[in-house]
């Protein structure tokens, strides 16, 4: 009889826990939510995050406050998010830099991109664009390769971010050319120097470089995605242009600190998926050469795992270093 009583009591306890979790998610959020952005205000990640934050604020009836924590290749912001309370009121707008590349670029990180975070959603992807100064006598990737091979060590490329540097390093590796990396603190001064002719080529964010291409200040040769982008469909992919196997696509992913209740993670994931698929949001992102995704937590975890492996290969084979 006592055994039967214990079984019944346990059953009611488990039902109660399930009900508590459901109620927990239904009442969330009960106060403002902080979204950490590990980059400065005004950059691509910040602008992307602010669109998402505004829509979530409207949906939830609670403010989603952007907290910019730039510096150290996104390490400062990622560490702050990893150490935040796992209560659902702090999330991180991470990138391929903070949650894939940094694993191989740094011998020691103050956070573990996998163990210290709960994946929420892959938010979007955006290719880079290979651009050159107009004075460079090339109009295609094949011509650039030929020029670089004829002048080993004399062609340079600007790199003001992990992705921009990796773009050049991967090109060097796959095209078997010798070029010199010119480091910058951010991509903006690198692009300015490209326009001014101080550097010769650059792999830059499509949304910032494309306006300069349209203005005739620089020339575009290709994009780094596996398929052409709707923002510039006339541009071939790097693979189409003569570099087989070339694919490098920066991405945005939303994460919570590890230990955040699963029901809350599930709710946030479902809500951000609705946001990125809103027609006005999707159109805004596509106009900025961002492909909105809105995945499940499991899909982001799988995607991140493959990206960590990909970046490890790039960093090792290209002997890439953080300058």
Image (spheres, helix red, strand yellow):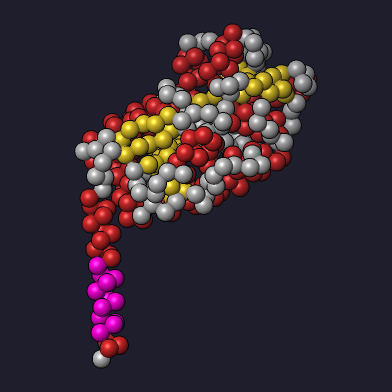
Magenta-span inclusion, residue 316: no
Residue 115 placement, left or right of 157: left
Count every numbered label the image shows and give the total: 0
Asked whether residue 184 appears in the rendered view, the answer is: yes
Q: Which image quadrant: the N terminus?
A: bottom left
Range drawn in magenta? 5-16
Tell me, yes or no, if residue 307 can be seen here: no
The residue at the point 55 percent across, 22 percent down is: 186
* Residue 26 coordinates in the image, percent (x, y): 23, 52
28 is higher (above) or lower (below) than 93: below
* Residue at the image position 69 percent from the left and 19 percent from the top: 156
- Which quarter of the picture shows residue 149? top right
**Rendering coords of residue 166 (x, y %):** 62, 32
Horizontal placement of 245 versus 60: left or right? right
**Percent position (x, y) of residue 179?**
72, 24
Residue closest to the eye, 265 or 243: 265
Location of residue 224 (image quadrant): top right
Q: Is residue 11 magenta?
A: yes
């Amino acid at each position: 009889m006592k055994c039967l009583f214990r079984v019944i009591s346990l059953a009611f306890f488990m039902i109660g826990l399930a009900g508590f979790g459901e109620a927990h998610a239904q009442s969330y959020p009960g106060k403002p939510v902080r979204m950490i952005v590990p980059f400065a205000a005004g950059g691509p990640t910040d602008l992307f995050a602010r669109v998402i934050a505004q829509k979530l604020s409207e949906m939830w009836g609670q403010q989603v406050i952007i907290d910019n924590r730039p510096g150290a290749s996104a390490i400062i912001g990622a560490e702050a998010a990893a150490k935040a309370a796992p209560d659902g009121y702090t999330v991180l707008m991470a990138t391929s830099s903070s949650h894939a590349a940094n694993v191989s670029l740094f011998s020691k990180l103050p956070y573990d991109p996998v163990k210290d975070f709960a994946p929420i959603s892959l938010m979007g992807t955006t290719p880079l664009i290979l651009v050159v100064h107009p004075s460079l006598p090339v109009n295609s990737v094949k011509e650039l390769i030929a020029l670089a091979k004829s002048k080993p060590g004399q062609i340079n490329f600007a790199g003001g971010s992990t992705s921009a540097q990796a773009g050049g390093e991967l090109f060097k590796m796959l095209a078997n050319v010798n070029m010199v990396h010119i480091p910058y603190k951010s991509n903006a001064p690198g692009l300015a120097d490209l326009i001014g002719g101080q550097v010769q080529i650059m792999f830059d964010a499509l949304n910032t470089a494309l306006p300069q291409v349209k203005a005739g200040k620089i020339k575009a040769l290709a994009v780094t995605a596996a398929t052409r982008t709707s923002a510039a469909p006339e541009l071939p992919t790097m693979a189409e242009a003569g570099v087989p196997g070339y694919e490098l696509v920066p991405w945005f992913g939303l994460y919570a600190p590890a230990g955040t209740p699963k029901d809350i993670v599930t709710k946030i994931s479902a809500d951000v998926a609705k946001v990125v698929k809103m027609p006005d949001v999707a159109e805004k992102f596509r106009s900025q050469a961002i492909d909105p995704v809105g995945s499940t937590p499991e899909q982001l975890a799988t995607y991140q795992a493959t990206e960590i492996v990909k970046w490890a290969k790039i960093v090792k084979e290209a002997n890439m270093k953080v300058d």
